């Protein structure tokens, strides 16, 4: 074979290779690389996160109930106390003196009552004597009447018997009045005793207020005072009015804040996993026992109903989680994170959340019918109010057409959202291949666009990180 023929054949081959390469390059230039995934059935767990701190369910500030100097503190921070245990005492010289004086007054009044009761007995005996004498005088008077009627005694004797009878009647009335007076005197003295005893109960209460006792079994979490300091009464949270803080550690909660966008999914008795920063590796099981109904400003923690500013800012809601099996290692105020399981759906049809897009189905159908291009007569057509796009959520599904992969927008109905996946209630079936990324591609992707799979890991660029 001559050299000319060899050169000619080589040139033809190069031309053919060039044509084929150009065709491939041209075809690939019109193909969009997309990351893909499939709709799969799996267990879907929806979790809402909240951060806050450990708090006892019940805690009280044991305040001063009497004015005076602290004579003794029996506990310190970290001590466990029993209900009724003495926590502290305040000087009690004056209350004790008042109690002693009133006790002497009660004793004296009770002695007077005893004396008045004896006077009653004497008055009763005098009445009995007067009744007997009256009975005798009555008999003498009756006999004198009969004798005088028969003119057997003189008028003087008759008048004497009658006068004696009248005297006995008056004496009896006098002694009955004296008895009534003694009874009234006794009742008055008993009332004085009751009054003194009631006053004494008040005095004992004032004396008892110099002793502070634990209202329940608990842990002493704060003691802001020292022995020798003077405490005051009646000013909540003021310096010198609080002796100590007592927490009931038998029921421990985690009080956390949940974002306003997630609170609608939180409800009572949902299971919760609580972790504490100070106890790494430990997970405490619990359940939701309180869901706040008032939004709290994130920067200040003040309820929106109490805020005087009109600024718009992120808001949270308070959620209280009661721990099922609290540990003795827990302390009030420890930072905690709660993972609230708001839903747990077995064998749910799911897709990655990032695959969802908002599109107008009518427009997407036109694009699909024209291989990703809008019909020429509609490109510059004005949009009337009646033909405004109606956006719905959906995904792009891969379809094989004439040895090419194209995407078609499919509206979907979604349900519960997980950390990275979302439940599909309608529009897809298990195994459907969908476009999951990348974000820059999904933002402009249209139905009918030719695509090819590119599931290589995405490398972050400076633009992506900016």
Image (spheres, rainbow, N blue to C red):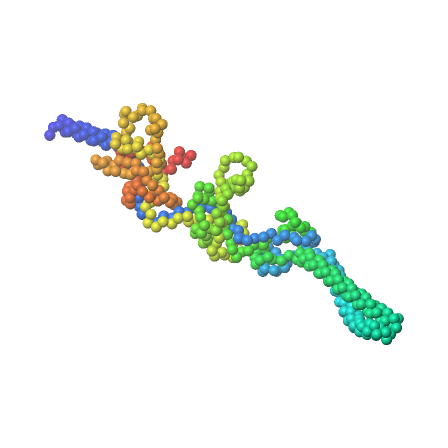
Question: Residue 321, percent across and down?
Answer: 48, 51
In the picture, measured across the screen, residue 15 lies left or right of residue 308, that is: left
Front-lying residue, 445 or 85: 85
Query: As displayed, is residue 168 above or below residue 459?
Result: below
Instruction: Examine the rendering and report whether any part of residue 231 can be seen.
Output: yes
Question: Residue 104, percent across and down?
Answer: 75, 62
Question: Residue 299, percent across and down?
Answer: 52, 40
- Residue at 70% across / 56% down in the picture? 91
- Residue at 76% across / 64% down in the picture? 180
- Residue at 65% across / 49% down in the picture? 234
Front-lying residue, 336 or 11: 336
Instruction: Examine the rendering and report whether any part of residue 129 can be seen.
Output: no
In the picture, measured across the screen, residue 453 lies left or right of residue 130, that is: left
Q: Quadrant of the C terminus?
A: top left
Front-lying residue, 373 or 425: 425
In the picture, measured across the screen, residue 232 lies left or right of residue 335, that is: right
């Amino acid at each position: 074979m001559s050299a000319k023929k060899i050169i000619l054949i080589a040139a033809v081959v190069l031309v053919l290779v060039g044509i084929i390469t150009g065709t491939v390059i041209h075809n690939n230039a019109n193909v969009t690389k997309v990351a893909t995934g499939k709709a799969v059935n799996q267990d879907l767990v929806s979790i809402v996160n909240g951060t806050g701190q450990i708090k006892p369910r019940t805690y009280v500030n044991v305040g001063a109930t009497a004015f005076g100097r602290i004579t003794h503190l029996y506990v310190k921070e970290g001590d466990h106390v029993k209900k009724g245990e003495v926590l502290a005492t305040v000087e009690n010289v004056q209350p004790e003196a008042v109690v002693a004086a009133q006790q002497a007054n009660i004793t004296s009044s009770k002695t007077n009552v005893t004396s008045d009761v004896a006077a009653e007995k004497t008055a009763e005996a005098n009445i009995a004597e007067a009744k007997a004498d009256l009975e005798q005088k009555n008999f003498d008077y009756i006999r004198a009447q009969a004798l005088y009627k028969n003119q057997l005694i003189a008028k003087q004797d008759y008048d004497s018997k009658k006068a004696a009878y009248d005297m006995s009647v008056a004496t009896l009335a006098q002694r009955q009045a004296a008895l009534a007076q003694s009874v009234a005197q006794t009742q008055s003295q008993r009332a004085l005793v009751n009054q003194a005893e009631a006053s004494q109960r008040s005095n004992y209460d004032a004396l008892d207020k110099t002793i502070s006792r634990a209202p329940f079994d608990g842990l002493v979490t704060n003691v802001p005072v020292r022995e020798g300091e003077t405490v005051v009464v009646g000013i909540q949270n003021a310096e010198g009015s609080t002796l100590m803080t007592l927490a009931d550690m038998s029921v421990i909660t985690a009080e956390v804040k949940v974002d306003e966008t997630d609170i609608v999914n939180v409800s009572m008795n949902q299971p919760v996993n609580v972790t504490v920063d100070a106890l790494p590796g430990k997970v405490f099981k619990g359940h939701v026992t309180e869901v706040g109904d008032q939004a709290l400003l994130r920067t200040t923690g003040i309820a929106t109903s109490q805020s005087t500013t009109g600024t718009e800012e992120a808001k949270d809601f308070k959620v209280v989680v009661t721990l099922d099996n609290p540990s003795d290692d827990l302390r009030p105020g420890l930072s905690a994170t709660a993972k609230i399981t708001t839903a747990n759906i077995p064998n749910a049809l799911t897709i990655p959340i990032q695959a969802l897009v908002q599109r107008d189905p009518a427009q997407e159908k036109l694009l699909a019918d024209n291989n990703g291009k809008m019909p020429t007569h509609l490109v510059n057509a004005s949009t009337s109010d009646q033909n405004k796009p109606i956006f719905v959520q959906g995904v792009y599904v891969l379809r094989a057409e004439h040895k090419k992969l194209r995407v078609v927008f499919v509206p979907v109905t979604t349900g519960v959202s997980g950390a990275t996946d979302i439940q599909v209630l309608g529009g897809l079936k298990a195994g459907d291949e969908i476009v999951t990324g990348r974000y820059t591609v999904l933002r402009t992707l249209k139905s009918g666009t030719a695509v090819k799979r590119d599931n290589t890991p995405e490398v972050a660029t400076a633009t992506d990180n900016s």
